[in-house]
Amino acid sequence: MMIWLKYLGLSGIGIALFYLLGVVLLRKSTLLRAKRWYYLIAIASSLLLPLISLAVPERDIDEAQDRLLPSFTIVIEEEPTITAPATKRNSIDWSRVLMATWAIGAASTLIWLTSGGYKLYRLCRTSTKRELSHNATLYEVDEELAPFTIGRAIFIPKSLSNSDITPTILSHELEHIRQKHYWDIIISTVLQPLQWWNPCAWGLLQQLRTNLEYLADQGVLREGRDRKTYQYQLLECTLGRKVELPSLSFSMQNLKKRIVMMNSKNKTNKKLAIVYALSALPVLAFLALGTQMVTIKQAEASTITEVAPPPTKDKVFEKLDEMPEFPGGGKAMMQWLSHNIQYPKDAIDAKIEGRVVVSFIVEKDGSISNAEVKKGVYESLDKEALRIVNAMPKWKPGMGNGQPARTRFFVPINFKFAQPAVQEGKVFEYLDDMPEFPGGQAAMMQWLSQNIQYPKEAVDGNIEGRVIVSFIIEKDGSISNAKVTKGVHESLDKEALRVVSAMPNWKPGKQDGQAVRARFTLPVSFKFAQPAVQEEKVFEYLDDMPEFPGGGKAMMEWLGQNIQYPKEAVDAKVEGRVMVSFVIEKDGSVSNAKVIRSIDPLLDNEALRVVNAMPNWKPGMQDGQPVRVRFTIPVSFKLPKPATAPTE
C-alpha cells in the first residue's frame, strides 16, 4: 500500500513539473507537432518511470525459497505465526486513509468516464449514420451539441448537417482522425483516474487537447481555406451549443486561444525548440532518480543483516544426505519460536504485520551463525526475527559423507494480529475444522442403516428415493434446526427428520480454535433391497488375460501420473509397496478393489483410490467369451533421496 502511494506521489510530482515547464516554455510556441510529442512523453514517463519502484528485485529471496528444505516447504502451515494481543488502538493509519480517499476518487472518475461512454452509445443508437473518408463515420444527432470527434466517429447536430459551414466542420474533424489524435485521448484518459487529485494533471490534459485543436486548425488552413472565414465559421458552430467531454470538440473555452494561434506567425526558432526539448531532461532525471531512491530504500529495508563473523574456508551446503535438525524436530522448532518471540510494541501501534524470511548457517557444532534477513517487512519486526533466530539452541548438525558440514537454512516467520472473536450465534457453512460424527463418515452410515425404519406406508406404496436434510451442529455437538430441503414423500421425510434428530452428539466444528455452530446437509436414501444375484465365477488365469489400454507400460505411466503421495505420509517419511487385488468385469470396468498387503492406511487408501479410478480395461476372454478376472498389481510409494549439492 505504501509503495503504491509513493508511486502516485512520484508520478504526480512528475506531471506537475512537466505541466509547469510546458506553461513557462511552450505556451506560445508554434511548433505544434513538437508540443504534441512533449505532452505524450510527459504523460508516459510520469506514469511508467515510477513503476520501477513497485518492482524491487527479489531474485535472491525467490532463489532462497526454492532451496527451502522439505520440512519447511511442505508443511507451509507450520510457519511460526506470532499473534499480537487484541488491543484497542486509537492511532489513525493515515496511509489507509489516503489509500481509501484515492480509491474513492479513482472509482468516481471511472464512473464519470463510463457514464460519458454510455451517453455516446445512446447518441450512436439514435443518430443518422453515414461513412466518410479516412474510415471515419459521421453521426448526425438531434441534440444541439458542439461538433466533436471521438476515435473515428464525428458527431454534429442535424441543424448543421446541410449548412454552409458543414464542409469546414468535416474538414476540421477529419484532420483529427487523419493525424490520429484519438491515441492522445486514449493515453490521457488513463491518466485521469490515477491523478484525479492532481490539478496539474488536469491542466496538462487541457494543454494537450488545446494543442490538438491547434494542429487540426493548422491542417485545415494548409488546404487553402481563408483564415478569417474559417474563424467566423468556428464561432458560428460553437455559439449556443454545449460541449461533450472528454472529446475533441468545438468550444468557446479554447476558441479565443485557437484564433490567436492561427493569427500568430511561426516565430519559434527550431534551435530554441531543441533547447526547450533539453529542458525536459531534468524532469526525466528527477523521475529516474526519485524512483531509484525509492527502490534503494526498499532494497535496504529487505536486507538488514547482523554483523557476521569473519568468513571461513569451509563450504556452506544447501543440501546434504543428512540435513541439520532442531532439537526435537521441525514442530519443536515452530513451538520454540512461538513461545520465545515477542511482537514489537511499535509494530502493534502501527498495525504492521507480515512475513520475515531469515537465512542462517548451522555450523558443524550445531550453533547458529550469519543470520540475515532475506525478505524484510518492518525494521522492528526484522530485528525481532533476527534476535530470536540467533537465540536458538544448538541444532543437530548436518552430515555429508559421514562428516559434519556447515549448512544454510531459511525460515519464514509470520507476524500477525489476533483475529476478532467469532461472532456469537453465527452459523458457518465452511470451517477450518468441520464437524464430525463419532467415529467418522463410515460410522455415521452404519448408525443410520441400523436406526432408520422404512415407513409401512412407503413400503406399501412402493415409494423410494433420497431425502436431503439440513441441520445445525451446535457448539456442544448436539443437533438442532433439522429440516427437509428436498423431500420425496411425507412419510419418508418424517422418518429422515426423526433419525437425524436422534443422532448422538457430534464433535463440533471449530473456527480459529473456537467451537462454533455449523450447518450440515445430509442425504438419507430409502431404497428397497434388491434380490440377491448369484455371483458369477471369477477367474484367476485365462488363455487371454485382461489388458490395460495400451498395455502394461501404459498402465505404469497412468499410475505415475495420477497417484498422489499423501502429505501426511511425506511428513512421516512413510514409503513402501501396497498390493491391491481387484476384479476386471466383463465390460472391462474395475470392481472389488481391496488391499491384500498393507503398508500404512494413508498409502493403502491412495492405492485403492487410484485403482478404482482406472479406465476400462480390455476384458479377459475364455472360450471366446468375456469373463470376470481377478488381477493383482503392486503400487509403490517411494520418497526421493536428497542430493548432496555444495555451494560456495
Image (cartoon, rainbow, N blue to C red):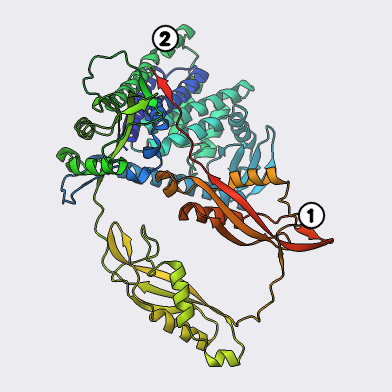
Q: Position of residue 391 (x, y in %)?
A: 19, 32
Q: Residue at position x 45%, y 26% from top? A: 44
Label 1, residues with CA under 10 Å away: few <14, some 14-19, many ≥20: few
The answer to which of 500 and 584 lies nearer the viewer is: 584
Instruction: Give the distance between the C-alpha atoms of the residues marked 1 and 2, in whole angstroms.
Output: 91 Å
Figure quadrant of residue 397: top left
* Amino acid type assigned to the residue bearing label 1 in the image: Asp
The answer to which of 377 and 605 lies nearer the viewer is: 605
Image depth: mark 1 or mark 2 in front: 1
State the quadrant of the N terminus. top left
Mark 1, residue position: 544
* Amino acid type assigned to the residue bearing label 2 in the image: Val
First in sequence: mark 1 or mark 2? 2
The answer to which of 474 and 265 lies nearer the viewer is: 474
- The answer to whether 332 appears left or right of 164 in the picture is left
Q: Residue at position x 45%, y 17% from top? A: 29
Q: Helix or strand or loop: what does disc 2 sit on?
A: helix
Mark 2, residue position: 275
- The answer to whether 245 appears left or right of 464 in the picture is left
Q: Please determine whether, in this image, residue 439 is positioned above or below residue 296.
A: below
